[in-house]
Amino acid sequence: INTLLHDCMRHATSKDGFFSHLFSKLDSLFRTVAPTKTAFLAVDGPASCAKCLTQRQRRRAHANKDAKNAKGSKGNGKGKGKWGKQGGKNGQTEQLSNNMLTPGVPFMTELTKALEYY
């Protein structure tokens, strides 16, 4: 399911857009596969200790790049894609990043609840 999650994150501009796109992709998948009893959706668990340092450095660099891009793109009026609206609560833009798809972050709790609901 990680491929679906990262694809949805890439095309969404808000959390609602992310979940809308994810549910659309899952609907399409289940129309193709048509499980008869149960479908088990697995999301990556915690990384091994050997990967943690490298992964942390990569994510920090990615977050810094996202912060620079957000500063440079304020007010250009361009959305990220059709999955979600530009702007979040109180007119502020919700920042979505692949770093949100990391075990242990609050977004993953929301994702778990959304997948259980689905």
Image: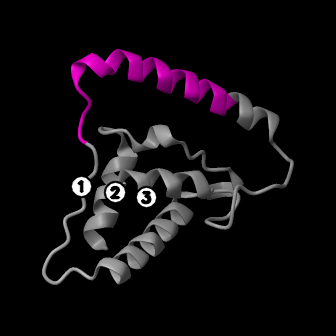
Q: Are marks 3 and 1 in contact (CB under 8 Å)?
A: no
Dot 2, how many residues are within 10 Å of its Cα: few (below 14), some (14-19), or many (20+)?
A: few
Q: Which residue is mark 3?
A: 4
87 relative to 30 in the view: left or right: right
Kind of residue sitting beneath label 1: Ala
Q: Nearer the viewer, residue 16 or 49?
A: 49
User: Considering the image in quadrants, where does the N terminus appear?
Assistant: bottom left
Return the x and y of residue 73 as percentages of the image width and height: 80, 40
Give the farthest residue toward the right.
76
Q: Which mark is residue 1?
A: 2
Give the farthest residue toward the front.
32
Residue at horizontal 30 percent and vertical 38 percent from the top: 104
Kind of residue sitting beneath label 2: Ile
Residue at horizontal 32 percent and vertical 20 percent from the top: 52
Among the 4 quarters of the image, the one containing residue 4: bottom left
| Residue 60 sits above or below residue 114 on the image | above
Q: Is residue 58 magenta?
A: yes
Residue at horizontal 50 percent and vertical 70 percent from the top: 20
Q: Which mark is residue 15?
A: none
Please report the bounds of the magenta region as a residue range: 45-67
Q: CA distance from mark 1 to mark 2?
A: 6 Å
Q: Are marks 1 and 2 in contact (CB under 8 Å)?
A: yes
Among the 4 quarters of the image, the one containing residue 27: bottom left
Kind of residue sitting beneath label 3: Leu
27 relative to 62 in the view: left or right: left
**Overall secondary structure of the magenta stretch?**
helix
| Residue 94 sits above or below residue 39 on the image | above
- Mark found first going from the N terminus, 1 or 2: 2
Q: Is residue 27 magenta?
A: no
Q: Nearer the viewer, residue 49 or 106?
A: 49
Dot 1, how many residues are within 10 Å of its Cα: few (below 14), some (14-19), or many (20+)?
A: few
